[in-house]
Image (spheres, grey):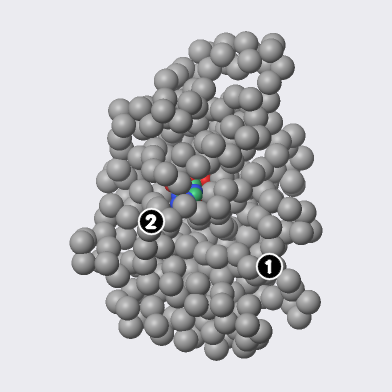
């Protein structure tokens, strides 16, 4: 584990001397099999892998779970050793925000950050892009790996990288699920036993809508309404359920061939998000333009 920027740079310089590519896997820790799948994908795309662990305060809104966010550094360190990640970088807040949070330079992607999770969590994505940009600047990776689980997030980061001509490749990793379909997430720990029984219905609903789309149903508004209704019947409080173009989250054009069905719900203390992509490859140019 490395906490210090100078020590990380020394390690990176040694690797660069040997000529290998470096991949970054940004996380907030409390690692599960989803995170470890990102590490494996990073290893397939680069010779060295830096996993970063930083619970970034600027992406949590007032009243959100920054303080309560589960932290398990010892267990995370062991999991990453087993996964043969090269370095776990755990910066402290002064390393990430040397001039303090209030004075920190911010990076903001208009448009994409203002819809869906962005409208429900104002400022959240500005916190994400700003911290990811800082991590990119510190590590200067050739490759960065993000999870499809946070579909809007990876799209925003792709846009930022594209817009700022960042010299790196973004790779998106498929969502890893529990046996019953629930997308793995640190926040699943907030579910009671009873809520945990209900939670897989979110993925089931996405999956059912995906089947209907594939069968040729084109009344998106009706599919969205029926899905929202069935989520309510399963005891969720839906925030949104939407069928969109995978490339840009806009309402699908008539000739759209790659869709994302994305949803956010509340269930007790937990806020769950999930999505499925239909008709497109996450890492191909089809979705990029
Ligand atoms: P987090 O620690 O929750 O900020 O997540 C760090 C990275 O892991 C992000 O790129 C997430 O999209 C990704 N991730 C989280 N859960 C999963 C999952 N179940 N499957 C795949 N990737 C995931």
**Relative to 191, is 96 above or below?**
above
Q: Identify which residue is drawn at 20% across, 61% down.
A: 193
Q: Identify which residue is drawn at 70% across, 39% down.
A: 169
* Quadrant where the image shows the N terminus: top left
Query: For mark 2, what is the residue?
Result: 178
Residue 213 lies in quadrant: bottom right
| Secondary-structure class at tag 1 | loop
| Secondary-structure class at tag 2 | loop
Instruction: State how many labels appear.
Output: 2
Crowdedness near tag 2: few (<14), some (14–19) or many (≥20) residues, C-alpha within 10 Å: few
Q: Name the foreground residue: 157 vs 203.
A: 203
Q: Which mark is residue 279?
A: 1
**Relative to 178, is 199 above or below?**
below
Q: Identify which residue is drawn at 52% across, 60% down.
A: 118
* Quadrant where the image shows the C terminus: bottom right
Residue that protrudes farthest toward the front in the picture = 179
Q: Where does residue 219 sit, x and y in percent of width and height? A: 62, 88
Spatial separation of the CA atoms under disc 2 and disc 1 = 24 Å
Q: Which comes before the other along the chain, label 2 or label 1?
A: 2
Q: Where does residue 137 sit, x and y in percent of width and height? A: 62, 29
Q: Name the foreground residue: 273 vs 107.
A: 273
Q: Is any part of residue 268 visible from this angle?
A: no
Q: Where does residue 109 sit, x and y in percent of width and height? A: 64, 52
Q: Identify which residue is drawn at 63% across, 60% down.
A: 112
Q: Is any part of residue 143 visible from this angle?
A: yes
Residue 15 lies in quadrant: top right
Crowdedness near tag 1: few (<14), some (14–19) or many (≥20) residues, C-alpha within 10 Å: some
Q: Do callouts 2 and 1 mark residues in contact (Cβ within 8 Å)?
A: no
The answer to whether residue 60 is left or right of residue 116 is left
Q: Where does residue 263 sit, x and y in percent of width and height? A: 48, 69
């Amino acid at each position: 584990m490395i906490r210090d920027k100078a020590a990380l740079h020394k390690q990176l310089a040694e690797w660069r001397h040997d000529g290998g590519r470096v991949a970054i896997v940004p996380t907030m820790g409390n690692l599960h099999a989803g995170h470890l799948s990102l590490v494996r994908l990073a290893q397939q795309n680069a010779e060295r892998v830096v996993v970063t662990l930083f619970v970034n305060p600027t992406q949590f809104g007032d009243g959100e779970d920054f303080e309560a966010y589960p932290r398990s550094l010892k267990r995370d360190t062991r999991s990453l050793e087993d996964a043969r990640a090269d370095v776990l970088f755990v910066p402290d807040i002064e390393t990430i925000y040397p001039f303090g949070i209030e004075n920190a330079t911010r990076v903001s992607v208009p448009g994409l950050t203002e819809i869906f999770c962005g409208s429900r969590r104002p400022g959240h994505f500005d916190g994400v892009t700003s911290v990811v940009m800082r991590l990119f600047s510190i590590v200067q990776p050739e490759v960065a790996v993000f999870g499809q689980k946070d579909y809007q997030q990876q799209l925003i980061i792709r846009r930022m990288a594209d817009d700022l001509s960042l010299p790196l490749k973004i790779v998106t990793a498929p969502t890893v699920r529990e046996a019953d379909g629930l997308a793995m997430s640190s926040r699943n720990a907030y579910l009671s036993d009873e809520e945990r029984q209900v939670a897989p219905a979110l993925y089931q609903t996405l999956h059912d809508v995906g089947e209907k789309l594939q069968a040729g149903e084109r009344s998106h508004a009706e599919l969205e309404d029926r899905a929202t209704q069935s989520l309510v019947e399963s005891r969720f409080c839906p925030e949104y359920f939407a069928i969109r173009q995978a490339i840009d989250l806009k309402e699908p054009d008539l000739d759209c061939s790659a869709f994302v069905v994305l949803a956010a719900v509340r269930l007790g203390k937990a806020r769950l998000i999930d999505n499925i992509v239909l008709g497109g490859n996450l890492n191909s140019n089809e979705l990029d333009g």
